[in-house]
Amino acid sequence: MSWTKFMGENVDRIGALQKQTPGMFSGFNAMGQAAKRSGALDEKTKELIALGIAISTRCDSCIAFHVKSLVRLKTTREELCEALEMIGYMGGGPSIAYGAKALEAYDEFTA
């Protein structure tokens, strides 16, 4: 799977929905900005939490978006893999399988 191509297709689909539902996206974007603001937890920690939720809900699109954010935040492969260990521990086999997808996306986005 090409995660880069997948992300491009997602952005196109979401953009089409955004044109039809601008109020929803305005609210969602405001919520995202507030949630990502650094406070007691930094943005990277918050994105690792978001990735755990994305993996546990088996959302490929969410995995791609949050891995892309983690790459932007200069997350190391070692940091990601440690997070994936905890995610796999808490979610079992399905989370391990989706964690492998997250690692594949990370490797592609950092190449």
Image: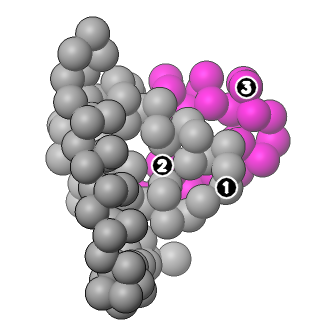
Pick whichever, 49 or 21, lies toward us: 21
Q: Name the residue under label 1.
A: 58
- Where does the image place residue 28, in percent across and percent down from the top left? 36, 56
Secondary structure type for disc 1: loop
Quarter occupied by residue 13 = bottom left
Vertically, is 108 above or below 69?
Answer: below
Residue 104 painted magenta: yes
At x 42%, y 32%, the residue is 48
Residue at 30% in and 16% down:
41
The kind of residue tagged 2 is Leu
Q: Name the residue under label 2.
A: 103
The residue positioned 32% from the left and 70% from the top of the image is 23
Q: Which amino acid does label 1 sit on?
A: Arg
Tell me where the magenta segment starts and ends, as one range: 82-106
Tell whether label 2 touches label 1 (CB within 8 Å): no
- The residues bearing labels 2 and 3 have C-alpha atoms spaced at a distance of 17 Å
- Residue pointed to by mark 3: 90
